[in-house]
């Protein structure tokens, strides 16, 4: 059985022996990069090295990078608890070449590690390549001895990676494992690809072009490599389980949840346990890296994650703040690899306790309003925007928490009604203040209210958030 700590060191040791510099994970809040909400891939800390703006004393590197995908371009928040493979916080293992080796060596290195280092059975592996990248297909044939049916050509942007609208970019190749016929799902590119049978665990990006303007691309003088392997997904494969939530680390966390609420969970309660275990990790790591719950930006994403977990705790029967009491289990599992978690333990604990105490004041009343408002609704119906807005405005329910609460019953929220209610409230607030005569005070008041007051919408404006995110 391979635990996550062993997998991490197998990966890093392998690339170190192959001449790569072992570089530490960068923080979850990217330094000097206001365009990106959270570090969402291993390459983030090397962005400027790839573009040539910055040089390092090494030309190849390897990392175990902590990442959060809960906002912006890569947002897996809604998947968590409901798919077998998505987490909001996970570790991405990567190897990087800054103009050093390219496609052939990258595929060789990956293939050797996967089949010799991790000993995965060759006959269960398959890869995708970008449809126009015949070179990659030929290399996989040569190096792995794959027949054509194991090399799936994908014509969509799924297999063409771009850092942004301009900058380095290139085709990518993803490695999948077939978990067996007993698991539902089809190969990548097929209509059943969302099933769990074929699990993607490693993505190799061949950075070979530079996008100079929309529709204009030139060859990079020094093509580079960026790869990312999901540590938890590899653990899932090596431990012979079908879901990341059944791996050793998550079993421990889920056991802690069950012990804390004093019940054994199954079915929907198990989905709650998964959400809580995942959200505990992302919350703890975000707080350790300096994010605190607030009403806008990164802090609001954190608040959404925390409150969502807290509603699930309530569903499991918790009637007092309990998230903080799960923290020692997490620190016990991950504190050695991430000492910042140990250093910040008291802060994380206090922040969880404070936020949960605050949220519990309105949680129960909000939930009973929600159940009254949806009592007669059926699958496919919509919750009116007014109620969703009231939950948000008066009871502190982030919109996605309400959506998550209705998901199992397949009830949607009327989003345009929600936005109308929001706009109307803003307009009314303004109207109520007109005629006060003191325009300057008024302006300050609105600024404050918009920032701190009832309309904690700023951070939730996904359109605006997406705009600034990579
Ligand atoms: P998926 O298609 O499953 O959503 P992806 O193609 O979005 O994954 P990449 O951006 O290629 O993922 O990231 C590189 C690797 O990181 C993936 O191959 C996978 O092993 C891992 N990974 C990506 N998203 C998650 C997640 N939400 N939770 C856990 N691991 C992930
Ligand atoms: Mg994804
Ligand atoms: Mg993918
Ligand atoms: Mg991928």
Image: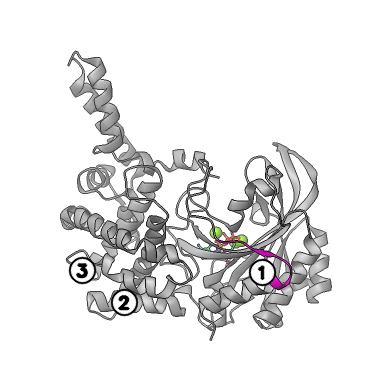
Q: Point out residue 43 in the picture as x, y percentages from the top left corner.
A: 62, 55
Q: Are marks 2 and 1 in contact (CB under 8 Å)?
A: no
Q: Point out residue 349 in the picture as x, y percentages from the top left corner.
A: 29, 62
Q: Earlier in the sequence, mark 3 or mark 1?
A: 1
State the image quarter where residue 181 is shown: bottom right
Say whether residue 6 is left or right of residue 352: right
Question: Which residue: 23% across, 65% down?
Answer: 314
Q: Earlier in the sequence, mark 3 or mark 2?
A: 2
Within 8 Å: ligand 1 and the Cβ of disc 1? yes
Q: Point out residue 151 in the picture as x, y percentages from the top left corner.
A: 74, 69
Q: Which mark is residue 256?
A: 2
Q: Quadrant of ligand 4?
A: bottom right
- Work out which quarter of the rendered image holds the C terminus and state it: top right
The residues colored magenta run 16-24
Between residue 107 and residue 408, name the one nearer to us.
107
Dot in front, 3 or 2: 2
In the depicted structure, whether residue 300 falls above or below residue 184? above
* Cα gap from disc 3 to disc 2, whole angstroms: 13 Å
Within 8 Å: ligand 1 and the Cβ of disc 3? no
Mark 3 secondary-structure assignment? loop
């Amino acid at each position: 059985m391979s635990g996550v700590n062993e997998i991490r060191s197998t990966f890093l040791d392998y690339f170190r022996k192959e001449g790569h510099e072992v570089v530490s994970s960068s923080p979850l809040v990217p330094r000097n990069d206001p365009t990106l909400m959270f570090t969402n891939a291993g390459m983030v800390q090397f962005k400027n090295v790839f573009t040539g703006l910055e040089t390092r004393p090494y030309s190849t590197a390897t990392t175990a990078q902590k990442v959060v995908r809960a906002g912006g371009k890569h947002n897996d928040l809604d998947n968590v608890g409901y798919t077998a493979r998505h987490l909001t916080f996970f570790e991405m293992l990567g190897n990087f070449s800054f103009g050093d080796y390219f496609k052939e060596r990258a595929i060789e290195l990956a293939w050797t590690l996967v089949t010799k280092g991790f000993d995965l059975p060759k006959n269960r592996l398959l890869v995708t390549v970008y449809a126009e990248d015949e070179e990659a297909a030929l290399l996989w044939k040569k190096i792995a001895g794959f027949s054509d049916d194991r090399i799936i050509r994908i014509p969509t942007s799924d297999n063409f990676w771009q850092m942004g609208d301009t900058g380095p970019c290139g085709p990518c190749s993803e490695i999948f494992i077939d978990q067996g016929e007993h698991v539902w799902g089809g190969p990548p590119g097929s209509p059943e690809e969302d099933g769990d049978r074929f699990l993607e665990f490693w993505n190799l990006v061949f950075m070979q072009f530079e996008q100079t303007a929309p529709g204009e691309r030139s060859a990079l003088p020094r093509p580079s490599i960026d790869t990312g392997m999901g540590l938890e997904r590899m653990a899932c494969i090596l431990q012979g389980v079908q879901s990341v939530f059944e791996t050793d680390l998550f079993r421990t966390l889920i056991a802690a949840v069950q012990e804390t609420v004093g019940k054994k969970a199954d079915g929907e309660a198990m989905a709650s346990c998964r959400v809580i275990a995942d959200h505990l990790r992302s919350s703890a790591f975000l707080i350790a890296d300096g994010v605190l719950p607030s009403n806008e930006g990164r802090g609001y994403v954190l608040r959404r994650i925390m409150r969502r977990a807290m509603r699930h705790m309530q569903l499991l029967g918790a009637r007092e703040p309990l998230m903080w009491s799960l923290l020692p289990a997490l620190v016990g599992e991950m504190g050695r690899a991430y000492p910042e978690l140990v250093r910040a333990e008291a802060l994380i604990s206090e922040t969880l306790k404070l936020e949960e105490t605050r949220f519990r004041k309105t949680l129960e009343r909000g939930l009973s309003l929600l159940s009254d408002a949806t009592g007669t609704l059926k699958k496919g119906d919509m919750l009116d925007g007014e109620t969703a807005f009231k939950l948000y405005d008066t009871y502190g329910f982030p919109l996605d928490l309400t959506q998550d609460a209705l998901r199992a019953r397949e009830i949607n929220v009327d989003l345009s009604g929600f936005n109308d209610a929001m706009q109307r409230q803003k307009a009314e607030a303004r109207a109520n203040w007109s005629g006060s005569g003191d325009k300057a005070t008024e302006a300050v008041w609105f600024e404050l209210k918009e920032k701190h007051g009832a309309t904690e919408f700023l951070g939730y404006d996904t359109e605006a958030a997406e705009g600034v995110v990579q």
